[in-house]
Structure formats: structure tokens, C-alpha cells
């Protein structure tokens, strides 16, 4: 009788586990869709807003806002020490004491940042550079730090529950309020001061919407050194990883901007920014939900292995043809549209930045996996290596190949992403090649057809559009013949909920 009960209990627990996995899958899929729609929507709003604001704001207004946001961009790093990521990553559900500890520390950090900004304003340097209106914009950004802290715990709760479709709602409201008010006030002639009011409104609305969706009813302050040390063990390493990334990217490109001629630096920025769009639209959206999802699955390596492979399969399926298509048609685009002729010198850089992003599409989910299962030390080794290689190799490539050496160096360094595969395989027996092989082969066939007709596509807009249709068709047909059945099965597995036993 006792043995029978034990078996029944085990079966019940296994069924509960299957239900949990099914729920995680459903929430993750809906999360990817939510983030993709959010990205498309917000980028659309931002693009329309910039077009309209360009008519009402002067170049100096844009310059003032850009200057103060650079200051804030440097201070953002110090507003968090990775505690939020630590609570999302840990296996057990956080209790209210842990929430209070993280809220207390982040509130203190936000007030310190406000203090630093007030000190900068007191020196008079800021007002001398951007005027009194710029000072008010900087102050509004300072106030947004403690306001953002009020959303931290609610955001963590939503991430742990994998309720990504709710997590994007405050961001959408913030974007709509920000740009609507900004455009209205700029139209009224308030100039750069419009940003100050729009920033404050955005921050307040974001807090209100977040608390309506996921209220934190037991809000409070608490200082517990034991809890803090436990969270900082992961959090500081996570934050240091971000610090290395900023040294590798933001600081390095800032130095480039100082030493390179302005036009050459402009070519690099243009090529890099545009090549990043496919990454932001695909990989970035998937990564926003995989860290909390993988963290929830870290005790089920068999399920986590399948989740990683599925992520790589769909990411490669989407991003490879976009990167290849952009690389093929960037030159015809500069020929068909005369106003884009000026960007011809940046084409080489654009193509090699795009190719390096192909590697990033594979390595980023794997690095995310290492963080999610608690192996942050290995991630730090990778980031440290990439930072050193960027700072050492890129100047050499610039000396040898001019400004195009930046993209060429990025492409060469991207091959070290193979190390992330090796590191993940030590913990999870993921199989990579079958997930990306068909998309890669189809993209290569697409590239061959596109390259053979490149002079024809460059004649006029109609031939350019025809080229896009033909190469897209080649990819679609190729991927269907190579892996059509698997695509159907994978999509079906995402949609269908497993039946209970």
C-alpha cells in the first residue's frame, strides 16, 4: 500500500512538471511575439516622431538632448549592480525580504545619481554647455531614476512569471506618452524644454501602468547584509559583464570618434547601426525572454537543451536571409537612390558588420544560457577576451585597411564565438549544426543568385524590387526543400499544448 502511494505521488509530480513546462513554453512563445510586436510598434512610432520633430526642433536642440543623454548613459551603469538579474536567475522564488533589500539598494543608488547630477549642475559646466533648458532636461532625466526604481520589483515578478506580454505594456504607454507630449510641446514652440516635460510624464505613467498590472503591495525598505551578499555574488559578476561590454563597445567607439576623421567615423556608425537592425528585431527580442525562461528550466537540462536548440533554429531561420539580403542589396540601393550615393564608401563595412552579426546570432543565446544556469564566470572570460581582442586587433586593422578595418576586425573576432559553443556543451549536450545548417545553406544559395544579378538590380527601382522578390523566393523555396517538414513540426510544437497523461 505504501509503495503504491509512492508511485502515484511520483506520477502526480511528473504530471505537474509537464504542466509547468507546457506553461513555460506557452508564456515564452507569447513573450517572443509580444516583444517582436513591441519592437516593430515602438520603432515605427520613433521613426514617425523623428520625422515630425525635425520640422520643429533645431539641430542644436537635438545636440543638447544628445549631450545630456550621453551623461545619463554613463550613469545608468551605476544605477544597478545586477541584483534584479540575480533575483530573476535564482531557482527559488524570492521572498518579500529579498524584494525589499533590492529596492532599498537601488533606491539609494538612484538618489546618489541624482546627487551626482546636481553636483554637475552646481559646477556650472552643464549650463555653460547646454543652457538652462538643457539643465532642466538633465534634471528630468535625474528624477526618472528613483521613479524607475519603483518599477523594479514589479518587473522582476513579471519576468519570473514569464508574463512578457504584460511586461511590454508599460513600455508601450511610456513611448506613446513621451512622443505625443514631446511633439505637442515642440509644436507649441517650447524647443528642447519639451523633452523635460515629456521625460517626467513618461516616467510617471510607466510607474502607474506597471503598478496597475503588477502591484507590489508590501513595499518597504530593508537592509540585510546576508541577503545582499548572496545576491551580489551573482549580481556583481553580471554587472561587471555589462561593464566589459560597455568598454568593448561604447568606450571604444567613443575613442574612435575622437581620433578618426568625422566622415570616416560617420561611415562606421552608419554601417554598424543599420547592420544591427536584423539583430535587434530577431535575436534581441528572443533574448529578452530566454534569460528568465532558461533560468526557470535550469533544473531540467533535458528541456533546456531542447529550448536552446529551438531558439537557435528559429533565430537562424529568420536572421540569415535578412543579413544576406541586406548585404546583397545595399550597393544596388545606393545606385538606384541618388541621395544614398554618399554612403557607398561604407558598403564594405556594412557587409562585414552584417556577417559578424551572423555569428552573434548563434553565440548570444549560448552566452545567455551560461548566465541563466549560473556560470557567469565563463561569460566573464568570454567578454574579457572579446574586449581585449577588440582593443588590440582593431587599431592594427585600422592602420592596415583604414576605417573599414573596424568592421573587418569585428568579423574576424566573431569567429571566437565557437568558444561559447564549447563552454555550453560542457554543461548541456546541445547540438548546434542541425539547427542552423538548412538556414545557412538556403542563405548561401540566396546570396549566389543575388550576387549574379547585382548589376541588374542596380538599374532602377523596379528591378531592385524584382531582385528582392526573386532572392526571397530562392530562400523560401530552398529552406522548404531542405527543412520544410522540420519547420512545420517545430511551429506545431510551439502552438500545441501537450496532452495530460
Image (cartoon, rainbow, N blue to C red):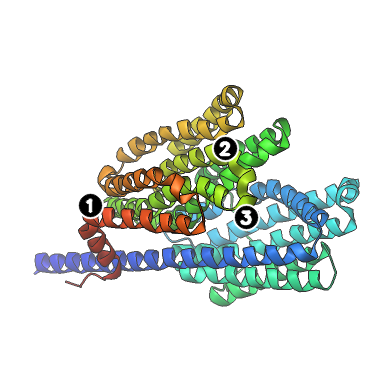
Left or right of 478 in this view: 399? right
| Residue 246 versus residue 480 in the image, above or below | above
Looking at the rendered structure, which numbered label has been put on residue 274?
A: none
Residue 295: horizontal and vertical position, in percent? 40, 54
| Residue 122 versus residue 488 in the image, above or below | above
Q: In front: mark 1 or mark 2? A: 1
Give the labeled residue for mark 1. 482
- On-image quarter of the C terminus: bottom left
| Nearest to the observer: residue 354 or residue 360 | 354
Q: In front: mark 1 or mark 3? A: 1
Q: Is residue 376 visible?
A: no
Left or right of 339 in this view: 408? left
User: Which residue is pictured at 31% across the width and 46% down the height?
Assistant: 445
Q: Residues within 10 Å of mark 3 (few under 14, many from 20)?
A: some
Looking at the rendered structure, which numbered label has been put on residue 223?
A: 3
Secondary element at tag 3: loop
Give the labeled residue for mark 2. 244
Mark 3 or mark 2, which is nearer the start of the sequence?
3
Mark 2 or mark 1, which is nearer the start of the sequence?
2
Q: Are marks 1 and 2 in contact (CB under 8 Å)?
A: no
Q: Are marks 2 and 3 in contact (CB under 8 Å)?
A: no
Amino acid at each position: 500500500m505504501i509503495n503504491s502511494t509512492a508511485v502515484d505521488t511520483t506520477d502526480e509530480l511528473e504530471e505537474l512538471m509537464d504542466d509547468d513546462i507546457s506553461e513555460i513554453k506557452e508564456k515564452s512563445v507569447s513573450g517572443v511575439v509580444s516583444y517582436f510586436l513591441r519592437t516593430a510598434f515602438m520603432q515605427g512610432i520613433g521613426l514617425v516622431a523623428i520625422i515630425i520633430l525635425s520640422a520643429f526642433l533645431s539641430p542644436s536642440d537635438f545636440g543638447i538632448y544628445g549631450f545630456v543623454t550621453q551623461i545619463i548613459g554613463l550613469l545608468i551603469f551605476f544605477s544597478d549592480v545586477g541584483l534584479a538579474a540575480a533575483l530573476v536567475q535564482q531557482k527559488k522564488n524570492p521572498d518579500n525580504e529579498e524584494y525589499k533589500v533590492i529596492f532599498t539598494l537601488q533606491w539609494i543608488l538612484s538618489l546618489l545619481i541624482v546627487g551626482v547630477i546636481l553636483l554637475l549642475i552646481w559646477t556650472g559646466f552643464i549650463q555653460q554647455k547646454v543652457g538652462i533648458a538643457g539643465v532642466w532636461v538633465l534634471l528630468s532625466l535625474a528624477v526618472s531614476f528613483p521613479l524607475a526604481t519603483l518599477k523594479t520589483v514589479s518587473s522582476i515578478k513579471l519576468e519570473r512569471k514569464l508574463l512578457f506580454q504584460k511586461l511590454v505594456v508599460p513600455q508601450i504607454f511610456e513611448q506613446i506618452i513621451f512622443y505625443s507630449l514631446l511633439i505637442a510641446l515642440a509644436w507649441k514652440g517650447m524647443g528642447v524644454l519639451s523633452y523635460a516635460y515629456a521625460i517626467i510624464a513618461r516616467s510617471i505613467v510607466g510607474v502607474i501602468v506597471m503598478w496597475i498590472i503588477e502591484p507590489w503591495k508590501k513595499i518597504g525598505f530593508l537592509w540585510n547584509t546576508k541577503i545582499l551578499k548572496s545576491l551580489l555574488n551573482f549580481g556583481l559578476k553580471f554587472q561587471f559583464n555589462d561593464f566589459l561590454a560597455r568598454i568593448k563597445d561604447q568606450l571604444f567607439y567613443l575613442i574612435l570618434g575622437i581620433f578618426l576623421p568625422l566622415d570616416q567615423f560617420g561611415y562606421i556608425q552608419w554601417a554598424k547601426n543599420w547592420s544591427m537592425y536584423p539583430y535587434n528585431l530577431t535575436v534581441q527580442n528572443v533574448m529578452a525572454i530566454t534569460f528568465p525562461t532558461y533560468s526557470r528550466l535550469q533544473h531540467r537540462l533535458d528541456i533546456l537543451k531542447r529550448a536552446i536548440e529551438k531558439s537557435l533554429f528559429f533565430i537562424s531561420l529568420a536572421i540569415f536571409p535578412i543579413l544576406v539580403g541586406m548585404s546583397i542589396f545595399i550597393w544596388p540601393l545606393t545606385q538606384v537612390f541618388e541621395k544614398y550615393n554618399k554612403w557607398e564608401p561604407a558598403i564594405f563595412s556594412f557587409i562585414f558588420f552584417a556577417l559578424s552579426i551572423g555569428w552573434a546570432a548563434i553565440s548570444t543565446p549560448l552566452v545567455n544560457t551560461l548566465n541563466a544556469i549560473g556560470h557567469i564566470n565563463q561569460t566573464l572570460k568570454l567578454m574579457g577576451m572579446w574586449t581585449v581582442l577588440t582593443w588590440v586587433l582593431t587599431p592594427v586593422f585600422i592602420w592596415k585597411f583604414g576605417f573599414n578595418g573596424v568592421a573587418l576586425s569585428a568579423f574576424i573576432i566573431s569567429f571566437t564565438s565557437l568558444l561559447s559553443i564549447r563552454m555550453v556543451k560542457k554543461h548541456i549536450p546541445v547540438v548546434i549544426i542541425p539547427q542552423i545548417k538548412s538556414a545557412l545553406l538556403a542563405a548561401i544559395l540566396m546570396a549566389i543568385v543575388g550576387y549574379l544579378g547585382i548589376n541588374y538590380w542596380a538599374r532602377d527601382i523596379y528591378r531592385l524590387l524584382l531582385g528582392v522578390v526573386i532572392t526571397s523566393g530562392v530562400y523560401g523555396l530552398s529552406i522548404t526543400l531542405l527543412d520544410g517538414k522540420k519547420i512545420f513540426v517545430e511551429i506545431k510544437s510551439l502552438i500545441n499544448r501537450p496532452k495530460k497523461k
